[in-house]
Image (tube, helix red, strand yellow):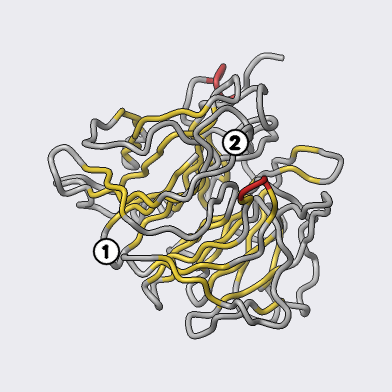
Amino acid sequence: MGFDSVPPGFFPGSGPTAILYGGEGPNSEALSGTYVLTLGTLAWNPKDTTGSPGPLHSHRMVYDGAINRIVLYGGYNVAGETADPLAGTWLLRGDTTPPTWNQIPASAIPLASHGMAYDPVRSQVIMFGGRTAGNQETGRTYAFDGTDWTRIGANCTDPPSPRSSPALAWDGQKIVLFGGIESGGALPNETWYLYPTASCWVKDITLTNLPSGRQRHRMAYNTMNGEILMFGGTLAGPELTNETWFFVRGTGPGTGWFKCDTQPFHPCGSPPLRRNGVGLAFGDTSAARMVMFGGGVGEGTFEKFQDTWTWDGSFGWSCHSQPSVCRPPG
């Protein structure tokens, strides 16, 4: 699914809001539709729009603060991965009535299950990896400047390996990349950085206590505490996980990766069930919380969740859906 939060006023008169587009249905079908989550009340509502990217799954979208638009790229418009992914770029504009999805003439290569994050220093969306034509993993990196995509780092000597389903997030200083799955099924647990003034990724070889390798996990940056939260995914096996990890930039004690309940003010609470492919974003500054939606227990015709969760430093994870939705029987 495509999922990210937008600032107050993205829609006229709105407060902090999260936006969801598309996703994968219970029979692996591609879904369409724009939905908004009011972060103050955690209430979902469909959003009428002019234009639409159509049915999509395995796409990615992020909020681009430089142009005040949601940027959506790629994905599949068929059930499963029975066709090549798309190469379309769509922008969601919130200040029109109704809001408007526009496809613009900007494309990289066909991609699905890639990673995307916004770099506010270079004022560009960064996109890495994914599956391209023939469902082959790629290791390319692209930057979107509000008008078009440009490949960067093509001549770097030691880039991340080609992979799909990695997670990317801004950490207040740089883009952080973790995980993904290589074409042979390996799940690297490397941590990579892309600095705003650079075109090449740098692998951090100094970190200890690294999470195990995983794919279809999600990461998001908490602007209030300056940390990345990572949740869920599929480990080797394959085995689903509901682990919650935090990444704190810097060096010295208390930095790097650590799991919930291992440091003060980072409780696990009552965590969601094991899953992958969730939507995860920063919630709102008044509550200083992260927000998560959905996910599933696999790819294709497997159970999909419809629950909404938040994480904060006081209570950890809390579910805001009916108990039978948060903890399905069986």
Furthest-right residue in view?
Answer: 237
Q: Residues within 10 Å of mark 2 (few under 14, many from 20)?
A: few
Q: Which residue is mark 2?
A: 83
The image quadrant of residue 242 is top right
Please name whichever residue, 68 or 271, is drawn nearer the observer in this view of the structure.
Answer: 68
Say what amino acid the circle numbered 2 marks. Ala
Residue drawn 47% across the image and 50% down it: 87
Q: Residues within 10 Å of mark 1 (few under 14, many from 20)?
A: some
Quadrant in the picture for the C terminus: top right
Say what amino acid the circle numbered 1 marks. Ile
Residue drawn 35% across the image and 49% down it: 90
Furthest-top residue in view?
Answer: 329
Please name whichever residue, 300 or 140, is drawn nearer the observer in this view of the structure.
Answer: 140
Question: Reading the chain from its start, which is encountered first: label 2 or label 1?
Answer: 1
In the image, residue 186 sits, relative to residue 208, either above or below, namely above
The image quadrant of residue 166 is bottom right
